[in-house]
Image (cartoon, rainbow, N blue to C red):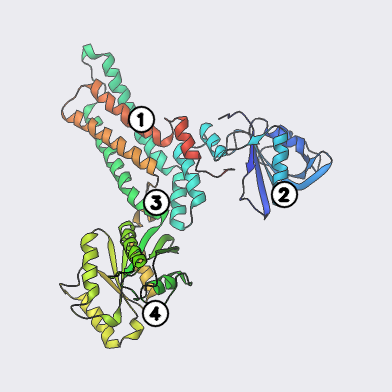
Amino acid sequence: MHHQETIVALATASGAGAVAIIRLSGSTAFNIASTVFTSVSKKVLVDQATHTVHLGHIADGNRVIDEVLATLFKNPNSYTGEDVIEFSCHGSPFIQQEIIQLCLQKGARMATAGEFTLRAFLNGKIDLSQAEAVADLIASDNEASHQLAIQQMRGGFSTEISKLREELLNFASLIELELDFAEEDVEFANRNDFQKLISKISLVLKRLIDSFATGNVLKNGIPVAIVGEPNVGKSTLLNALLNEERAIVSDIAGTTRDTIEDELTIGGIGFRFIDTAGIRETTDTIEGLGIKKTFEKIEQAQVVIYLFDAREFRVSGSKFQVEIEKIKNKYPQKKLLVIANKIDQVSQEQNKNINAQFSTKNPQITNYKLQTISAKTGEGVEDLKNILLDFVNTGALRNNETIVTNTRHYDALLKALEEINKVQEGIDIELSGDLMAIDIRQALYHFGEITGEITNDDLLGNIFANFCIGK
């Protein structure tokens, strides 16, 4: 990558809109801008103060392309740390392309995906984990994923890692110093203090590693599989949750042959609801494939909603009880919510019987959360949403604790913990400093991988390839 060149790209979404922003960054950004932009007040652009906005026209010779606002950011006080200028023009795709092509003719080149943020990283404006959080922030589509990305972009995670790395580096330096005085048998690194530090680092790493399970589902949405026998109202429930006719509803059993997925935000948390084919014995090949896929979706789901027809409820011998036990035995770690649907079609007495049986110690009905609803009328659907929200562990998010959401960070933390455990073993058996130093260096390496203090072009290429052009 040629980081000395001036780059240009559309910084707003492509397509027509009220306003579009075209961004230039690099050592010749102001010079290029001055050749295409003329201020209405005849000011010389390059002589103006940073963080100022100027009204003018962009023209190709005598041909005026658009009236724009030019915003100046002089280095190092810009997003990239370089000279940056942004043209706010009218949102016509034709105007956008005309301005970009004009900048290219004057010496700029098209920015690659994420190159503005890459330059911000290379110029020390942000570290690598903060750069990755920029992409997460752009992709966030609910309150939880937005809050996680903001937290990381502000440097909460990288600050915690950098502090641990600095403390470990100080001890590593002392141990390395001991090696220079090996013949004198001098001890510079206090072993008791070193033990306390290793224990502290180990606890922090374990907490961050454990947070990944929560962070991953909050970032990507919690998958919820809606399962049950045919014609119990699974598609009707999906439509009721989404408040739209997303799935086909029919009295004919086996209407849903394939899975249908859609997303819904509840209390700021994203949920991915999966309507599945009804579970039953069938000779229909297509329906059989749908049922097979149902069990695949149960495997992937974090929460399973098992729906049954309230009219079919019996104290013992109900077929759905057998299916519930199968699911519970096969997936003991999954949260299982049992729903008695079509409650509007049973008597008040039958409704009481259902609730009574699930609330007592019935050996055939255990370890489930029961909710009675009518997906058709909407009765109990809001209560169901609240129950689903209660299933999510949002305590860490509410308390603004550091939560790991990035798989690359998670892998680096696992490797760092493995090396820290080796250091602990070395302390326990009073291993010589030169051997412990090897494991300490490896732990430092993995810490550095997270923040970008240790990196390579391949890693940067993989990370920034996922960015949009213009960011």
The image quarter containing residue 111 is top right
Q: Decide if residue 197 is in sight here.
A: no
Judging depth in this view, the residue of 249 and 453 nearest the camera is 249
Instruction: Please tell me which residue is depicted at 59% across the width and 33% down the height of the picture.
Output: 76
The residue closer to the viewer here, 153 or 273, is 273
Amino acid at circle 2: Phe
Of the residues under marks 1 and 4, which one precedes in the sequence?
Answer: 4
Find residue 316 and report its horizontal and vertical position in percent.
Answer: 18, 78
The reply to whether the C-beta atoms of the residues labelled 2 and 3 are less than 8 Å apart is no
Residue 258 in the image: above or below residue 162: below
Cα–Cα span, label 3 and label 4? 48 Å
Q: Residue at x 43, y 73 (%)?
A: 240
Q: Crowding at label 3, few (<14), some or many (≥20) Cα neighbours within 10 Å? A: few
Q: Is residue 307 left or right of residue 23?
A: left
Q: CA distance from mark 1 to mark 3?
A: 27 Å
Q: Which residue is mark 2?
A: 94
Residue 400's tag is 3
Image check: 33 left or right of 407? right
**Which residue carries the number 1 mark?**
445
Quadrant in the picture for residue 23: top right
User: Which mark is in front, 1 or 2?
Assistant: 2
As helix, strand or loop, the secondary structure at mark 2 comes to helix
Return the disc, 4 or 2, that comes first in the chain's sequence.
2
Q: Residue 251, labelled with which disc?
A: 4
**Can you tell which of label 1 and label 4 is closer to the viewer?**
4
- Could you tell me which residue is drawn at 74 percent across and 47 percent down? 68
Quick check: 28 above or below 354?
Answer: above
